[in-house]
Image (cartoon, rainbow, N blue to C red):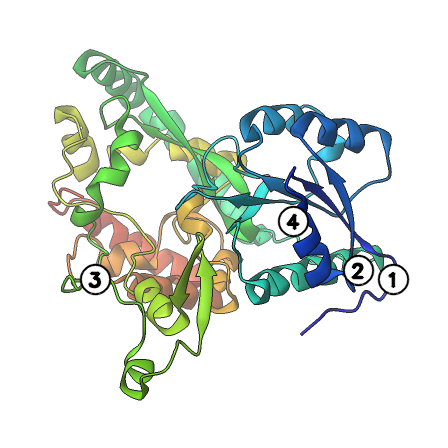
Amino acid sequence: MTAVSETNQPFRVLFVDNDERRIKSFERAFYSQVAVINVPDSWSAISYLDTNEPVDLILFNDNLNTRGFMNAFKAKQSRTKIPIILLTDKERVDLTADPYHGYVIDAFPFNYSETAFQIRLNYLIQKRDYQRDGHTLHKPVTVRIPVGKRVFDIGLSFMILLMISPLLLVVAILVKLDSKGPVFYSSKRVGMGFKIFDMYKFRTMSTGADKLLATMASQNMYNKVAEKTEEEEQCDECKLANIPCQRPLYLDQKQVCEIIYQREQKAKAMFSKFKEDPRVTRLGKILRNTSIDELPQLFNILRGDMSFVGNRPLPLYEAEKLTNIGYARRFAAPAGLTGLWQVTKRGKTKVSDQERIHLDVLYAKRFSLRTDMLILLRTVKAVWQKENV
């Protein structure tokens, strides 16, 4: 399976490697699709990028001072649009960590499967040709909060902020006295139309709480309960037929069965929420149970980042898991201080991420001033329930 470039221009690959056999092998495998420019080290690569025609892909030997190359590569903005693929002998490379994040799109072992690399290469060639033809892969769509809803939000949020300003001052003082750290906590959230903004709360957790998140996966309320099994390499069908895997995928320099991979992905939670969260301060528990910690979001509503009623704005690491058509529909609705999910499922331990997505999508399809008023009335009752989430 090959991708033919509609532009009739070769796909230029800057291959940073000093192993001639590996270079020749790559050229032989993909000679009909790419033009290979070889340089022996990272500094030669930077020099080539600065003095020659643009390239479409950088293929980089991870043993040739990757960190130094990445630091130099990122120093000039014109380079940073070029995708990078690593060739490595490491068992696992975390592409979300520095210096790779945002620049390195994939990693393959030195003994990569040509079929797997071909799939990746086909996509990159098609993407380049599509963009050169004057198209964009993701046409931005401007989504706005309806005028009536926006007028309601501005009027009500301004009035409430005036009324509760003494309470906000008292809470700010108590937060400062209760534990070390800033009074307010802000985090990047994704709202309506995938807009990213800073959402504000009173700080309810100890400083550095975000770093503990990765160690608390077992306490996530959205995790599905599953028995631990030994790592599987083949699906049942291939095992019974006693044949090699018929649906291989190559992820993190390792071959996995597509069926097993999809099954594991479905078992992973898309959202994070914890019961009896140990990161929460003493005052924080009170603020959360009464939802007072959410009051600074009235400023977000006044600014237009959020609405009183909508789907909760998600952290970036959660939003990036909801980009297919069915899930992304939730972002067609405004980000909200409260919403359909909060008044129907809040505090219940047996809630799945699929249930929450369904409610978010349902609101996005049907939201109106009448439904917003009903949700606001139900919220008045819901905020006083006793919960430690």
Real-space CA distance between mark 2 and mark 1, rounded to the nearest whole angstrom: 6 Å
Disc 3 target residue: 224
Question: What's the distance in space between the residues labelled 3 and 1, CA to CA?
Answer: 48 Å
- The answer to which of 12 and 215 lies nearer the viewer is 12
Residue 318 or residue 153, whichever sits in front: 318
Mark 3 crowd level (few <14, some 14–19, many ≥20, 10 Å Cα):
some
Q: Earlier in the sequence, mark 3 or mark 1?
A: 1
- For residue 90, which quarter of the picture? top left
Name which quarter of the figure residue 5 lies in.
Answer: bottom right
Residue 42 in which image quadrant: top right
Q: CA distance from mark 4 to mark 1?
A: 30 Å
* Residue shown at 89% from the left, 63% from the top: 8
Secondary structure of the residue carrying tag 1 is loop
Q: Looking at the picture, tell me which residue is in the foreground, 322 or 127.
A: 127
Residue 117 shown left or right of residue 152 in the figure: right
Please state if 3 lies on the left or on the right of 287 as rendered. right
Residue farthest to the right, as pictured: 8
Residue wearing tag 1: 7
Among numbered discs 4 and 3, the one appearing first in the sequence: 4
Residue at point 16%, 57% (across, down) = 348
Q: Quadrant of the N terminus?
A: bottom right
| Residue furthest to the front | 21
Along the horizontal axis of the image, is 37 left or right of 295? right
Which residue position is annotated with label 4?
A: 21
